[in-house]
Amino acid sequence: MRKQGNHWSLEVTDGVLVARFEKGIDFDAFGAEAFPAFKELLAAHGDDIVGSANFVAVDEHLDNEVYEVWEAAAEEYSELSNYQRGAFVANGITKFSLKSSLEVPGAENKAFDDFETAIQWVRTGTVQN
């Protein structure tokens, strides 16, 4: 199942919720469009989701409302029985800010430079060299 909007997409693939937020996204879309779509995916696939891989390619500093959406997502993930890992690919300080905003109790979070590696780690818990 895939949900998408202007410069963002969400899909569940092999137990991983894959989120892409591209340059040009309207920050209001995080809460107004992407978060409701996220909740729909959790309702449909929540029992199968083992983690999330997040690609954030925005250049601007994210505003507080975006971080509030990430924190709300972390709360939703904490309700999933099988959620174990969250991975992030982003530039600079955004990577670490998002990583701390999506802390899920009992789950491991990691930042990566390569999105495919991040997805692999979320799915398997390991990274092949």
Image (cartoon, rainbow, N blue to C red):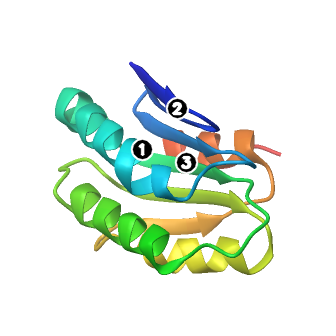
Q: Which of labels 3 and 1 is toward the front?
A: 1
Q: What's the residue at 23%, 57% (across, down)?
A: 76
Q: Is residue 58 above or below residue 48?
A: below
Q: Position of residue 26 (x, y in %)?
A: 59, 52
Residues under labels 3 and 1: Cα distance? 15 Å
Q: Position of residue 68 (x, y in %)?
A: 37, 73
Helix, strand or loop at disc 2? strand
Q: What's the residue at 40%, 32% (across, down)?
A: 15
Q: What's the residue at 72%, 60% (across, down)?
A: 112
**Mark 1 Cα shell of 10 Å, populated few (<14), some (14-19), many (≥20):** many
First-in-chain label (2 vs 1): 2
Helix, strand or loop at disc 1? helix
Q: Are marks 3 and 2 in contact (CB under 8 Å)?
A: no
Q: Which residue is mark 3?
A: 53
Residue type for callout 1: Ala
Q: Which mark is residue 114?
A: none
Residues under labels 3 and 2: Cα distance? 18 Å
Q: Position of residue 125 (x, y in %)?
A: 53, 50
Q: Which residue is mark 1?
A: 34
Q: Position of residue 119 (x, y in %)?
A: 61, 41
Residues under labels 2 and 1: Cα distance? 8 Å
Q: Which residue is mark 2?
A: 5
Residue type for callout 2: Gly
Residue 13 shows in this picture? no
Residue 12 shows in this picture? yes
Residue 128 location, quadrant: top right
Q: Are marks 3 and 1 in contact (CB under 8 Å)?
A: no
Q: Are marks 2 and 1 in contact (CB under 8 Å)?
A: yes
Residue type for callout 3: Ala
Q: What's the residue at 25%, 42% (across, down)?
A: 39
Q: Is residue 33 left or right of residue 98?
A: left
